[in-house]
Amino acid sequence: MTNWLKTRRAKMIFLWIAGMAVLSALLGQRVVELPAVLGGGSSSTPWAIFLPLPVVIALAHGLSSRARAVEAACHRSIGRWDAALVAGTVMLSALALGAAAVATDGMPALAVRNLMLLSGTAAVLTALHSAEAGAGAIALVVVLTNSIGPSVRGSGHLRVMQAPADDLWSWLLASAALLAAIALLVRDPRPTRHVGR
């Protein structure tokens, strides 16, 4: 277990969770104006939607150390531990963000929802294809959802990261991504491919 925690870089993930909570307390409900690339206009976007990025990147980096050929020889299911790492990261982050919101007037729901969405997306693609695909998916989701303007038809379904905290569609999408990731990591369907190796 100790080797697995070191290999998955759990200490780095936990440090970023603490950093995310501190940033959440410092930023509170501050917003930033982001110009839209598609559809024109701009929108006031809370900083809280970007808070999960370092945690998700650390989690994806930890999952990139998966060596399934070696781990398949273990008598314990490493995939279950990886699924627990993803679920535990989300739960611990939710607790940390909630504590920061109690101390200040933060926006933990947006950050938790986006953490679920990005963690799930990265872990699904890592489980199905490669760690590189998982990392690329994080960037793609962030860029695409933040470059669509609020005036674009159907933008309410596309701008899931900027959706209000009570938006049902974005919560369903984030929950589906996280549950799919956990199921795929437990199942561990095929060996991870490493680009360039």
Image (tube, rainbow, N blue to C red):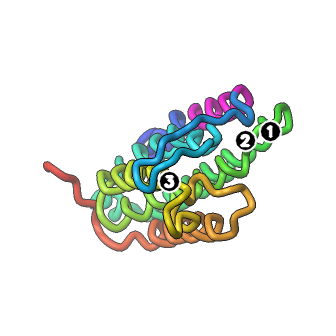
Q: Are marks 2 and 1 in contact (CB under 8 Å)?
A: yes
- Label 2: which secondary element: helix
Q: Is residue 18 magenta?
A: yes
Amino acid under disc 3? Gly
Nearest the camera: 92 or 175? 175
Q: Which label sits on residue 97? A: 2
Amino acid under disc 2? Leu
Q: Is residue 77 magenta?
A: no
Q: Main secondary structure of the magenta part?
A: helix
- Residue at 82% x, 32% y: name it: 104
Q: Which label sits on residue 149? A: 3
Range of magenta residues? 14-26
- Asked if residue 14 is positioned above or below residue 151 in the image, the reply reads above
The Cα–Cα distance between marks 3 and 2, rounded to whole angstroms, is: 28 Å
Q: Which residue is mark 1?
A: 101
Q: Are marks 3 and 1 in contact (CB under 8 Å)?
A: no
Task: Look at the image and tell me whether residue 165 can be seen.
Answer: yes
